[in-house]
Image (cartoon, coloured by chain):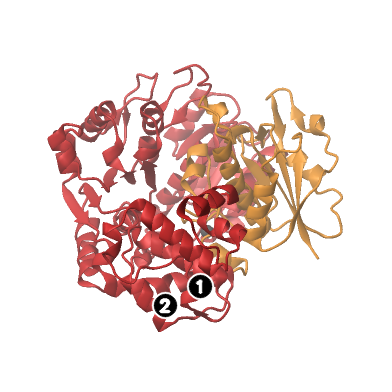
Chain colours: A orange, B red
Amino acid sequence: MSRIYLVPIHLNAPEWLGRLRACIEKTFGIRAKCCSFPIDLPAAFDPARNQYSSSLILQQLIANPPADARKILGITDVDLFIPILTYVFGEAQLDGIGAVVSLHRLKNRFYGLPEDNDLMVERLMKESVHELGHTFGLFHCAWFGCALNASTYVEDIDQKSCELCPDCRNAIGLA
Amino acid sequence: MKPADIGILIVDDEASVRDSLCKWFRLDGYRVDTADEGASALRKLQDDSWDIVLLDIKMPGMDGLELQRRIKQIDKDIVTIVMTAFASVDTSIQAMKEGAFDYIVKPIDPDDMGHLIRNAVQHRQLLTENLNLRQQLAEMSYSDEIVGESDAIRQVLARVATVAQTDSTVMIRGESGTGKELVAMAIHGNSNRRYFPMITINCGAYTEGLLESELFGHEKGAFTGAMYRRRGKLEMADKGTLFLDEIGNIGRKMQMDLLRVIESRQFTRLGGDKQIQADFRIISATNRDLEQAVREGSFREDLYYRLNVFSITLPPLRERKSDIPLIARFFMNRFARSMNKAVTDISPETLDMLMKYNWPGNIRELRNVIERAMVGAKSSRIDPGDLSFPFHPSPGAVEDESLEAVEKNHIQNILSRTGGNVSQAAAILKISRLTLYNKIEKYQLKKG
Ligand SMILES: [Zn+2]
Ligand SMILES: [Zn+2]
């Protein structure tokens, strides 16, 4: 039976991993499993930008997928970028196996606001469903409430839900 | 025009930039290709049709300015955007003079990139006079969820239709759970602002200081720990709709600030001095008696008049009971789909009970009751046994009872239904077993 692997990178046993797993299982109807892969984080570090290349992390993440892996989602707390952009919340292979999301800019603390763990987990769930949605071949969605709506600011994430709209569900055969 | 109908060509000698841009645009569904220098870009432009070209200014061989000139010779309507690694403003301005749509400095803020491309696409569409995208978006309707055929709800929908196309400020009144947000979405979704977001802010959910920061945003360094600029909801609502839920809950200072914003459509971020313009329509909602609040002095009269230009009042569910079967079936079908459960009917006895109940929580409560019934439903039909709380058959009887009497009665009913299983009853009542034991003791209840 195929699974979605959830891989914490540079995170020690976060207590919310269970909630994230439940959310992903519910959304995609596929069993999810948490496990750790060896990831060489320093190799993805760019000292000039003081950030980590999401593409280099993704490459490592999908290098040796377990036989039963349907998708692999890396979750990290370091700040991610792709060369042309100042930052990204995550990166996914369109119609591929892997995705990675970062908690770094999902934390209220980053914006100088009081920490809110529940809010952070909610944002993480939305972005995880978003990136995994891409791995299932979904493009960005025009529905404002849909998890696949493109979010470039954390405020945008707060405006959407962690659910897929009927169009997106349809497109990947979940309707 | 769907994103897939729009072709974006990226010309840059740096492979990592080409790759990351290419991936980025593909996620939006655009057709994308790349070229690593001017000559091959021109070949691609001749072979295929491209709508937008992003090109690097500094490239070996033909530079960006020269490439842009040749592109404009092929088709002056191709939208060009020049990219530069350094802020070499002179070259960028030259490119703009020669017809570039815009220029960007690498690396780019993701949001700027998103805006830029959306604007470029829109520009290209205007040039080609193709308004398909608009039509496609216009077909999205948000009003499916406002279910009902009663006169009361027809009147609401008529009011929505009347006001949607105008830019008027709307206040939606009604008890909790009557669907005020859905009505706001219907107004927004049928207005000319529907291509832009509806930003919701629940005024009751924030302390005054946080609400300020939510609405106005803040500048880097505005207060301890404000490490980055943060956009407020007012900015995010630009060109769209700002939905202020539970407007009756805001304090005096925020009332004054809001009034100022509504009058000027201008504001500054916290800790900033730059005036920001935003064009948004305001829809507010409240379950409180604002006239009373105005009389008592807790809500500003001038703000009240500003917000209450056009008002829509949602009837409580108990005043449109004829809609209950329709709404119950609507939720049944929806949950059947999302839970993948073959429940297709509601028994007449169940409907009868639903119709007789008073629904203090309105549609939201009805939805929750149906959802829970669907979870428990053992057949293809929702039966009274699937309903998770006892319905008082005689409406009005509740009102004369004390809270304790209702609680005692309710707990007894649940205990009877679970056959005295305390764990199960506690789970249904969402209280701990210990609390339940205490209440059984207090009310001298029979288990089972
Ligand atoms: Zn995305
Ligand atoms: Zn969607």
Mark 2: few, some, or many residues within 10 Å (few <14, many ≥20)? Answer: some
Q: Horizontally, is B113 left or right of B166 in the view?
A: right
* Between B103 and A26, the one nearer to me in the picture: A26
Kindly report the distance in space between the C-alpha atoms of the residues bearing marks 2 and 1.
9 Å
Residue drawn at point x = 29 percent, y = 54 percent: B192
Q: Which residue is disc 2 drawn over?
A: B350
Task: Classify the position of the C terminus of chain B by image quarter.
Answer: bottom right
Dot 1: element: helix
Give the amino acid type for the residue marked by disc 2 in the picture. Answer: Thr
Q: Quadrant of residue B108?
A: top right
Q: Horizontally, is B284 left or right of B372 in the view?
A: left
Q: Are marks 2 and 1 in contact (CB under 8 Å)?
A: yes
The percent coordinates of residue A175 (x first, y second) are 57, 70
Residue drawn at point x = 35 percent, y = 36 percent: B234
Q: Which residue is disc 1 drawn over?
A: B386
Q: Can you see residue B162?
A: yes
Residue drawn at point x = 71 percent, y = 41 percent: A75
* Between B199 and B174, the one nearer to me in the picture: B174
